[in-house]
Image (spheres, grey):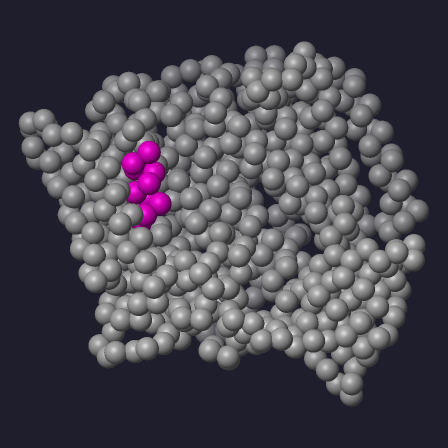
Amino acid sequence: MSSLVGFISLSLAIGINFFLLFSYFFLKNKNYNFNLIVRLSSVLTLISFFSLMFSYVTSDFSNFNVFQNSHSNKPLIYKISGTWGNHEGSMLLWISILSIYGFLFSITKVADLKFKQLTLVIQSSLHILFGLFIVFTSNPFLVNSVIVKEGLGLNPILQDPGLAIHPPVLYAGYVGYSIIFSLAIAGLLNKNNDDEWLYIAKKWSLISWTFLTGGIALGSYWAYYELGWGGWWFWDPVENISLMPWITGLALVHSLLMIRGEQILKKWIIFLSILCFSLSIFGTFLVRSGILTSVHSFAADASRGLFILLIFFIITGFGFLVFLLRTPENSKPINLLFVNKVSALVINNVLMIITTLTILLGTIYPIIIEVITNDRISVGGPYFNSTVIPIMMPGFLLMSVAPVLSWQTNRLRNAKLYVLGFMIISVVVLIQSYFTTFNTWGVLGLILGVWIIVASIISIFSSYKIKFSYKMLQKINPHIAHIGVGIAIVGITCSSVFKEEYDYNINEGDKFRIKNTFITFQKVETTNEANFQALRANFLIKKDEKLVANIRAGKNYYPVSKMITSEAGIFHEWFRDIYFIVGDQKDNNWFIKIYINPFVSFIWLGVLIMVLSGFIGVTKK
């Protein structure tokens, strides 16, 4: 019954959006409530999504999608997350979030009613395209032809609280760029040709980028503690796909800041608005077509991939065609000086686009080579680390001082203080590195990260009279975001460059020492959980003869899917993580791998600061 309700609700939502398009273009008399119809479409789409979720929660195996991706013994949280833990459900989540953005935009106050209607019409067109994709190629409401009493279960890798939250947050970022795309196209087509939409797009772009940041961070943290690789970023193709709209979205956010400076790069902003959503759809195509091999991708149907590729060409082609035919003129002059805020933002934008193109090349190059030669190659960390990082570094340097630059002059307030601060940080890091482990990238990364933090703090205290209030927090918010970036860079540098690895073949009861930490491999236990068997090794960690932690690491065996997953054990400290992985047993000895990841917690702290800063920025008028 719930499958029928879900399918009918989705079909009605698509039909309502068709009516909206028809009435907008062909009916001269528009006496109906435009906003109400958009909201009705959104409600019906959400009813469809929650109908599928109800089927999962109640273990309704008459639904083929539930049968393939669920099991009655699964905990409730994984029954819920199973709704989007598959191709069909994830696409229904995509269109549901698209509807939520349309609903929210319909209740916002916009001065130009015709502009608002045109934006919602474009948003409705996107709903139709993805709705038809779901109905014809990825229907999550198909009914089993035979009666079944049990399901096949969810991929064990997806059975994790972090990954239960990760897709909705990530999609809120991806799909958020749809409303920015709609605003940009409506801005081009709007005959009034005013710039009000730029101020509206400013908040929506910040919302999308903030959600995307949170989604990427959640996925990265999940990979860190769940996959047992000892790291948090692997330049996996699907990771790269999420990074590209994040970088272009960051460029868009910074470009929209120039509205405050009485200068508008309107052409560039429209280009980025179209590009952000196009990259989101392109990433969806690569993941859903099965072209990419990744732990993140779970679809391998060429027909679905071709359908999404067609949607990508329609949306991207239409967007850039409108952009070329109705290219706006800059209504305000651009004051480019040697060192001013506009110059810094423009240079930063250029560097971000070059970085995006570099990542795109490294991601699709193996695909192109395989199509031409039928040989499979891989492009991994060495390529991206040697190309992306050097391109991004000058941009980060500019970012550290850009907030205190002037819009109209070359003047930098307290220039001597900044130069002195940078020199002191450089000397201190060089001395520290010389007496410990010298690494060129490590030195540059630490100088850069610490400099961004210090420069941002100097900017706050030199530019504002500090008063503890939310209004003051909004004023210094860009500096706070940059502090978060600096903290994250310190964490990224230290955990990547100064990481240590230890291998042991030891028996139960053995003890060993890593620097000032004593570790006892206590025992191995096997237990039966609700839907898996757990093998756990207990490690006692002592410092200064005091027991500070009992860490459990091991493996899970899932009988339904007959899969084994690694479960890392992590001892978190402020300045390092001790990361345990349990391997196989041989001759009564267990293979144990231990990583020492210094300052890795700074990555999550920096990202958290950026996300909070993003939401604070949304509330600013």
At x 46%, y 78%, the residue is 560
At x 21%, y 24%, the residue is 114
| Residue at far bottom of view | 587
Horizontally, residue 433 falls left or right of residue 192, namely right
In percent of width and height, residue 489 lies at 69, 42
What stretch of residues is rendered in magenta? 95-104
At x 25%, y 74%, the residue is 144
* Corner quadrant of residue 403: top right
Q: Is residue 446 above or below residue 620?
A: below
Q: Main secondary structure of the magenta part?
A: helix
In percent of width and height, residue 14 lies at 19, 48
In percent of width and height, residue 75 lies at 47, 64
Horizontally, residue 27 falls left or right of residue 5, namely left
In percent of width and height, residue 591 lies at 76, 76
* Corner quadrant of residue 101: top left
Q: Nearer the viewer, residue 531 or 384?
A: 531
Horizontally, residue 524 falls left or right of residue 381, namely right
Q: Is residue 434 above or below residue 190?
A: below
Residue 416 is a magenta residue: no
At x 43%, y 58%, the residue is 81
